[in-house]
């Protein structure tokens, strides 16, 4: 009986232990003990054999996984349910692989804990009974069916032709196949079509004892099943263990095969967690690669742009090469825009984050997009008092533009675009598959009436360089950069689509309590705004950047000192610190990086001014340097006018 089961609660919070003990006692469990640390729990288990342990992974004196290892070695029959407020997707998978029966994340409903606890105890009872089922011929039919029908796993028996002679009722809960209707039917009735060949191998293997057949199979869902919402899952992934049954031991020559019995455990959620983890790791790796490519490409563009700017200074508009040089500048800018897409996917940083009203950003983008796409009707629904978000406005404009372009390409002959904003509260149940935190969010949905996408396309839609368009018609970076930018703002994005029925992208961004501050307009600088008779130290590891930078700064009227490493830059600064007015510092260098170089020079002179430079956008390290300081940042490639304006701003600042 469940009431006789022995339960141990291990949690470092005494109040939690007392609450769970009271809950379990009131639910009929009479023998419940508690421990507040790992050593106390192990002593308790050394004296008593427990059926179930509710275990918190985070304990003051040892790792919860150490206790699991002890249970696996000394009390293999004891079921373990992880109960913690710190369980991530990775720790949950790790616990399950270590042998935990299930896990519960705080806060939880009492019914959830009681249900999982009951299932775990039933599972233990079933396992113990199955181990000796052939030796217990006097096992009553009533007790046997009670244990079988209360197991969360599908338990079945087959005759020697592969027809079901028994299958537990849980098959109806999982697949909507009626258990009674499956009796007499062949096992292929429930097998997913693409796994039929694999299933034939498993079920036709007539092994016993330690050589039982085991593996993974997919079984069909009979009708519409609301368990997965809009995901349209047509099958469940099951862990199979099948054992042959004979009238005599298989060691005897005349033994006759009677059929098989086995267990199917639903591991669909576990496989989904594993797939999400693998996808996140794959996108992270691609992001790192994309960021590195963009950084190196921006350095090349900087050299091209710098030399082009220098050549333009020596020619006027009547020169035969003038238009060609201006074309080169245009191509450089197009290349820079391409690397911005890569950096967006690489999550290389947010340049200018501030409290923002997304309604205003969206209205502006809708107006601009509407001017160029007359064949598309834009329909909007705006939340009247939309919560503030902290974002880089330019990156949000890029996100919207990329989504709109994607929608327009799906509606080549025109259609309708629906854009909606709303305040949204997300709870723990809603976001458990999105690897995000609960709380207040601003939700933006973009829906088109285009051609839609199949499932295979949706699974790759955020991969960089993936495109369904023909060669030369797209880079495959638009939606990849959308994904990277949203993730970098601690949000997430979902997509739902059907072929012929359009697509919907939904963005979730965390809301902020900060107030929006309106800023005054900024003016444009020019080469004429230069400061003369100043000394600049240029630190960059790329020879081409140093050479073109020295020449440009010289034309702007600066005296230039150069260094090709952080170490050399520090040495030159120590020798000339009384002359140097500003340092242009590359943030990404081998050996000693930009951050370390900055910190060491700041120790020499806390008042020195820096203009940070990088082929990346502003990352976390650069943001720390820029926050509240009198320093500046310029992203490669930049023009001579942009460099002149940034230098002027830094040099015009008054001492703190």
Image (spheres, helix red, strand yellow):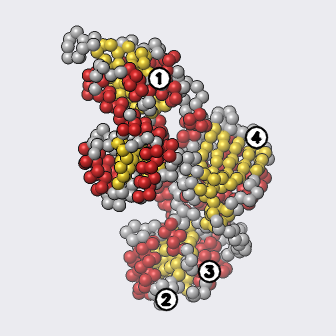
- First in sequence: mark 3 or mark 1? 1
Q: Residue at x 76, y 40 (%)?
A: 415
Give the alpha-carbon distance from disc 4 to disc 2, as whole Å: 63 Å
Residue of label 2? 579
Residue of label 1? 191
| Residue 320 in view in this figure | no
Question: Can you give x and y, in whole percent of width and height, for residue 476 in the image?
Answer: 58, 46
Instruction: Say what secondary structure mark 1 lies in.
Output: loop
- First in sequence: mark 4 or mark 2? 4
Residue of label 4? 415
Q: Which mark is residue 648?
A: 3
Instruction: Say what secondary structure mark 2 lies in.
Output: loop
- First in sequence: mark 3 or mark 4? 4
Outermost top residue: 254
- First in sequence: mark 4 or mark 1? 1
Instruction: Say what secondary structure mark 4 lies in.
Output: strand
Q: Residue at x 55, y 50 (%)?
A: 428
Give the alpha-carbon distance from disc 3 to disc 4, as whole Å: 49 Å
Is mark 4 in CB contact (under 8 Å) with mark 2? no
> Label 2 crowding class (10 Å Cα cut-off): few <14, some 14-19, many 20+?
few
Q: Which mark is residue 237?
A: none
| Residue 112 in view in this figure | yes
Closest to the camera, between mark 3 and mark 1, is 1
Q: Between residues 62 and 387, which one lies in front from this camera angle? A: 62
């Amino acid at each position: 009986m469940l009431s006789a089961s022995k339960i141990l609660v291990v949690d470092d919070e005494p109040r939690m232990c007392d609450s769970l003990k009271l809950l379990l006692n009131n639910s009929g469990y009479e023998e419940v003990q508690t421990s507040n640390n790992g050593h106390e729990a192990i002593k308790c288990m050394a004296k008593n054999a427990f059926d179930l342990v509710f275990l918190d992974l985070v304990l003051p004196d040892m790792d919860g996984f150490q206790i699991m290892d002890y249970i696996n070695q000394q009390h293999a029959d004891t079921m373990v349910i992880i109960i913690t407020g710190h369980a991530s997707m990775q720790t949950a998978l790790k616990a399950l692989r270590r042998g935990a029966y299930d896990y519960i994340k705080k806060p939880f409903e009492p019914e959830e804990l009681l249900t999982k606890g009951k299932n775990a105890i039933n599972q233990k009872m079933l396992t113990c009974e199955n181990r000796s089922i052939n030796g217990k011929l006097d096992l009553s039919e009533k007790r046997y069916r009670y244990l079988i029908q209360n197991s969360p796993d599908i338990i079945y028996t087959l005759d020697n032709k592969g027809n079901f002679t028994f299958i537990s009722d849980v098959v109806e809960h999982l697949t909507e196949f009626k258990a009674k209707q499956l009796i007499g039917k062949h096992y292929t009735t429930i097998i997913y079509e693409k796994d039929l060949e694999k299933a034939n191998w498993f079920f036709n293997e007539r092994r016993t004892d330690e050589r039982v057949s085991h593996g993974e199979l997919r079984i069909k869902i009979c009708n519409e099943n609301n368990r997965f919402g809009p995901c349209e899952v047509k099958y469940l992934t099951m862990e199979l263990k099948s054992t042959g049954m004979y009238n005599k031991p298989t060691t005897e020559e005349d033994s006759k095969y009677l059929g098989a019995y086995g267990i199917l455990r639903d591991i669909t959620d576990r496989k989904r967690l594993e797939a999400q983890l693998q996808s996140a790791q794959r996108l992270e790796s691609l992001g790192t690669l994309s960021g590195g490519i963009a950084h190196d490409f921006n350095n090349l563009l900087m050299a091209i742009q710098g030399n082009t700017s220098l050549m333009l200074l020596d020619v006027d508009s009547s020169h035969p090469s003038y238009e060609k040089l201006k074309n080169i500048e245009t191509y450089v800018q197009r290349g820079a825009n391409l690397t911005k897409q890569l950096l967006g996917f690489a999550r290389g940083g947010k340049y200018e984050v501030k409290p923002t009203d997304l309604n205003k950003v969206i209205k502006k983008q809708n107006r601009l997009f509407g001017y160029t796409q007359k064949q598309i009707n834009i329909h909007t629904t705006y939340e009247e008092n939309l919560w503030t978000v902290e974002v880089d406005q330019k990156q949000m404009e890029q996100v919207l533009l990329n989504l709109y372009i994607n929608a327009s390409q799906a509606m080549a002959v025109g259609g309708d675009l629906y854009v909606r904003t709303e305040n949204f509260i997300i709870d723990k149940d809603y976001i458990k598959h999105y690897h995000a935190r609960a709380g207040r969010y601003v939700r933006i949905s973009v829906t088109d009436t285009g051609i839609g996408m199949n499932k295979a396309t949706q699974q790759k839609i955020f991969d960089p360089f993936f495109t369904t368009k023909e060669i030369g018609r797209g880079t495959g970076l638009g939606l990849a950069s959308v994904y990277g930018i949203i993730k970098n703002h601690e949000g997430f994005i979902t997509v739902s689509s059907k072929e012929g029925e359009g697509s919907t992208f939904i963005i979730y961004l965390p809301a902020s309590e900060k107030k929006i501050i309106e800023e005054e307009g900024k003016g444009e600088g020019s080469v004429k705004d230069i400061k003369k008779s100043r000394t600049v130290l240029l630190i960059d590891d790329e020879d081409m950047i140093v050479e073109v930078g020295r020449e440009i700064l010289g034309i702007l009227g600066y005296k230039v000192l150069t260094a090709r490493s952080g170490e050399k830059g520090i040495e030159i600064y120590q020798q000339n610190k009384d002359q140097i007015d500003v340092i242009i510092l590359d943030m990404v260098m081998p050996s000693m990086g930009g951050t370390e170089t900055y910190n060491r020079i700041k120790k020499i002179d806390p008042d020195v001014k820096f203009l940070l430079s990088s082929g990346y956008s502003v990352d976390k390290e650069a943001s720390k340097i820029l926050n509240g300081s009198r320093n500046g940042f310029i992203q490669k490639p930049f023009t001579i006018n942009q460099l002149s304006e940034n230098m002027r701003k830094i040099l015009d600042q008054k001492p703190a």
